[in-house]
Amino acid sequence: MDLDAIDLSDMEFWARPWSERNAAFATLRRERPIAFFTEPPIGDFPEGPGYYAITRHADILAISRNPEVFSSAQGAVSILDMPAEMNEFYGSMISMDDPRHARLRRIVSGTFTPKMLAKILDDVQTTAIETVDAVMDRDEFDLVEEISSPFPLIIICDMMGIPPSERAMVLAQSNIILSGGDPEFIPEGEDPVMAFIGAGMMLAELMNGLAAERRVTPTDDLLSALVNTSVDGEQLTPEELASFFILLAVAGNETTRTAISHAVANLGMNPDQKRIWLDDIEGVMPTAVEEIVRYASPVVWMRRTLTQDFELSGHQFRAGEKVVLYYGSANRDEAVFTDPDRFDVRRDPNPHVGFGGPGPHFCLGAHLARREITLMMTELLTRLPGLELAGEPQQLRSNFVNGIKHLPVRVRR
Ligand code: HEM
């Protein structure tokens, strides 16, 4: 694709096959690593001021390490500035700077104690086994529907004490929030912004109801710990709790789903890598998990906003300008990764930024996500080694999640 024909603001770009998208990012890294794009109007949102796409690994590291200059709080971490009514549900710690961010992260991390994590990680294993049990006698199925979509959802719901009867609702609403307007999730004709606000409201209501119950009758779940914990006398307010839950439901669900879907798709397309992994499932696991996250790069980007004028890699930025960090591009930067388009389960070192760059917002759930991928891949490789692709992976039309909507697979016995 010609450099000047690349337009990251055009949804048609994100409908292109992965190979074309990756080639376009390679062109940007090589020829225009800090590239300006306009922000055309979307629905009721007026035209925005535009943003710089940051596509090289080194620049993303430098920006992530400098949150005083590159703020997460001005506007939002989405490309669009969030309208005030959305901040009520979506104003979570991911779009705050220190000291507000540090306060929330401290309270939340205080509940992710070793004891709580040990219980969650036990549950992850049980859920992985049960999820695979459900497909053991099927010859053909959609891996996304049967495995990679329910699995992380059940884990987040169990963590937060959400009853099984509400899982489908949580899945549908988090799909709307992350869909980036894919018509399969937002019916044609419905205003995406209204659908987005409605989804936030439904999740917040669910959480408020459950939190009220846990305040009176605490159980052993994370939600009980969250509502009853206090760090230096500080507790989460009900609004903060609802926003945090929405962040977890959104950040912990589709990301892990995307990683697992890509893992199976890439093993299907690279039988040599599958052979290597099958020959030593446990030994190859640590490098394979990192490679899955690098190669899938489930979160395509996060935004930062300049708090002051600043020069980076010869480019002079002005205060107030937006930069968008393209993690998937950094993860294929040939300056850092040898043969970056190759899926290599033994890649080492692998300094990918799939969980974000080094800095205060580095993924809170990285440990849990690695564990989820490890346990699910262990189940799939040991119990269904004959799993193979039965059709093309169907790409999600989103500029934000590098998703797979459907992945037809069959089991060779
Ligand atoms: C493969 C799976 C995952 C990927 C690729 C991923 C990716 C990311 C990325 C790129 C960020 C950085 C945001 C920024 O710098 O602005 C982030 C933050 C975050 N992630 Fe994850 N994530 C995954 C799984 C999870 C899980 C399972 C959870 C929770 C259960 C989670 C919870 C969070 C939270 C709460 C933040 C915000 C942290 C903060 O602002 O301090 N993530 N994630």
Image (cartoon, rainbow, N blue to C red):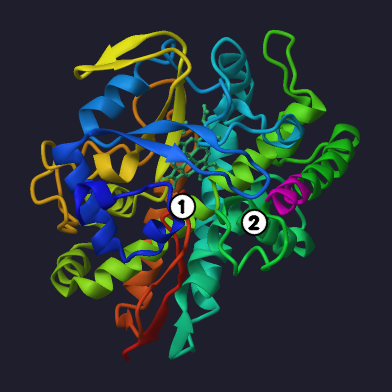
- Pick the front one: 137 or 191: 191
379 versus 47 height, above or below: below
Where is residue 327 drawn, in percent x and y? 33, 40
Q: Quadrant of the C terminus?
A: bottom left
The residue nearer to you, when weighing 367 against 73, is 73
Is 337 positioned to the left or the right of 155 in the image?
left
Instruction: Please report the residue visible at 13 percent of the width from the left and 71 percent of the height from the top.
Output: 272
Q: Is residue 30 visible?
A: yes
Q: Find residue 58 and report its horizontal and vertical position in percent.
A: 21, 27
Label the magenta part by its dominant secondary structure.
helix
Which residue is depicted at the point 54% across and 56% down? 152
Q: Badge 2 is on which residue? A: 176
Q: Residue 401: which numbered mark, if any? A: 1
Magenta residues (range) = 193-200
Q: Nearer the viewer, residue 319 or 294?
A: 319
Horizontally, is 251 left or right of 369 in the view? right
Q: Quadrant of the N terminus?
A: bottom left
Whole-Å distance between the Cαs marked 2 and 1?
Answer: 12 Å
Q: Residue at x 17, y 68 (%)?
A: 279
Query: Looking at the picture, which amino acid does disc 2 mark?
Result: Ile
Residue type at mark 1: give it. Answer: Val
* Label 2 Cα neighbours within 10 Å, binned few <14 / some 14-19 / many ≥20: many
The image shows a total of numbered marks equal to 2
